[in-house]
Image (tube, rainbow, N blue to C red):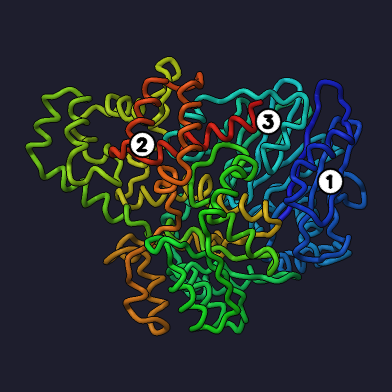
Amino acid sequence: MCRIVGYWDFSIGLSDEQLIIAMRDTMLDRGPDDCGEFCCSSGIALGHRRLSIIDLSQNGHQPMMDTTKRYVLVYNGEIYNYQIIQHELEALGYTFKGTSDTELLLYAYIQWKEKCLDRLQGMFAFAIWDDDEEQLFIARDRVGVKPLYYYQNEKIFMFASELKAFQAHPQFEKKINTRALSNFLMFGYIDAPLSIFENCYKLEAGHYLILRKDQSVQKVCYWSVRSSFNNDFSKSLSLKELLVDSFTSRMRSDVPVGVFLSGGIDSSLVTMLLSEQGYHLNTFTVGFDHQSYDESAYAHYVAQRFGTQHEQFTLEQKDVETIIPLLPYIYDEPFGDSSAIATYFLAQSVKPYVKVVLSADGADELFGGYDRYAQTPQRYAYFQKRRFLKYLTSILSPERSVSILSKTPYEMGIDKFLRIKNSLHAKHFMEHYYNDLSHFRKEDLNVNHLADYHPLFSTVPKSIEENLMLYDFEHYLPDDILVKVDRATSASAIEAREPFLDHRLVEYAFSQSLESKMPNGGKAPLKALLEGAFDESFIYRKKQGFGVPLEIWCKNNFRDLTDMLLQEAAKSEEFNPFYISKLRRAFFANERVDFEKIWFLMVYMMWKKVWMV
């Protein structure tokens, strides 16, 4: 885990060494082992902070330059098949000074240019300056494990692993992107390519970008999971072979490696398969003092079953009180996934033990693990069979229809659009729903773009369940789940690896039929692999989420903080003061309120107080 930063100043054609150092060192805690910078007369400056994982010597120092001094690289990530590519490059005449995958990536780009991306198996975000062509190349891994932002105006282009680096540059303009803010208030995260700031973007997963001297930008999608829909994997490795290969490749390290073990299906499978391969594992879990949130007993059971060196840490209220004020610094744009609190606590707790952890994210999106995948078509069918409800929505106004339908038994836990998409005009409904969730003033509303984010508007000819899985893989996974884990671990100076997100495994999963993944509940192929090692009551128990009892605490122990932030939101120019005040009163009166609305507003106001001063 490292952090990268750079800029190209077109206005004066010069770069400032002290400026790139200041930008680089905003991410000091993310890369404490080494640092470096590069500046040249073309106006290019590159910076790097390193967390040493493979080849701990200075052979991995960055920025890294080739012997001709034409190419300069800054890189964050891990290439898991680096040994195979190294042998290929050595056969072509390249000589390596060390075993760092940084050197390998530099030579791979020199040899194959952007086509090198097709050979890489791993997680990465990197930038390469070509001094002869006066061209900057930046790229991000296929799934979006590693972050990469960029900012551009008529004078400058900047890129960085984190937004906070841009704020150290005097040409960065802090202006809220209202579309991104509405996106956050709808979903709790900001969908790529948007960021919270105007003119600032996330490079999407599976994309690269080329910037030339004339300031022209070429952005290319080099990989998409959609291309694997009709692939034939009958002659390839089996699912278990793919899993073992992916899991074991992510154990390669010159520093200690551990596993985040929740006790759920996915992390238990990682622990089981690695133990079967002879690894003596360090496993870590977080427990909660609220029983309904606590799965630590299952994690302890798995650890005992495979003889791991297991550590358990209990998240208490006092820990949450400490972590909440840190969230705007850890996640430097608004981020509303409340499980980030427990993730950061766990990352901080394992820091004395290991420098690398495996986190079993992505299996739900690949193999249909979320309850909503099975529940959505059932609930949709429920509405379709109720002719009276369909009749009501045909004769009433959209607003009245939504009011009535919100009282149906399936109101909670499902986008209401699923129950009325065939009865209401989409735009009318989305206007109502958007007005309800965004809390924006009327002049700031932009309803039309919401269709871009809704899986039911997908042009992919798949079932509802498959469209939801695809949507989650392309949006929720990279922009929520992976952001949560990356920022929490990097802020703790440890590297998180995602063993379920090897692109070969992803392509395999999306080529499989829905029936094979969800015959009677989700993740059937993964559960089948656990049979024999665990009894059915463990394997087929109800899925439990990963979170904290935040709503209870915000009404009681954190009441003063919650009240203060909601009152500040009511006074903030972005929001409708009447709506916020009404929401605040209802929440503290214990009326039924969607707590996510409360938490998203709190998160935004905390972020604003830190970054918009």
The relative height of residue 553 versus residue 352 in the rendered view (above or below) is above
Crowdedness near tag 2: few (<14), some (14–19) or many (≥20) residues, C-alpha within 10 Å: some
- Badge nearest the viewer, 3 or 1: 3
From where the camera sits, is residue 246 visible?
no
Q: Amino acid at mark 2?
A: Phe
Q: Nearer the viewer, residue 341 or 172?
A: 341
- Which quarter shows the C terminus? top right
Q: Give x and y (percent) for residue 394.
A: 13, 28
Which residue occupies the extreme left position in the image? 388
Disc 1 designates what residue? 72
- Badge nearest the viewer, 2 or 1: 2
At a point 64% along the width and 33% down the height, the residue shown is 610
Looking at the image, how many numbered discs can be counted on the residues?
A: 3
Disc 3 designates what residue? 151
At a point 51% along the width and 54% down the height, the residue shown is 317
Disc 2 designates what residue? 588
The relative height of residue 59 versus residue 239 in the rendered view (above or below) is above
Q: Give x and y (percent) for residue 123.
A: 64, 56
SS of the residue under disc 1: strand
SS of the residue under disc 3: strand
Instruction: Give the mark nearer the N terminus: 3 vs 2.
Output: 3
Q: Amino acid at mark 1?
A: Val
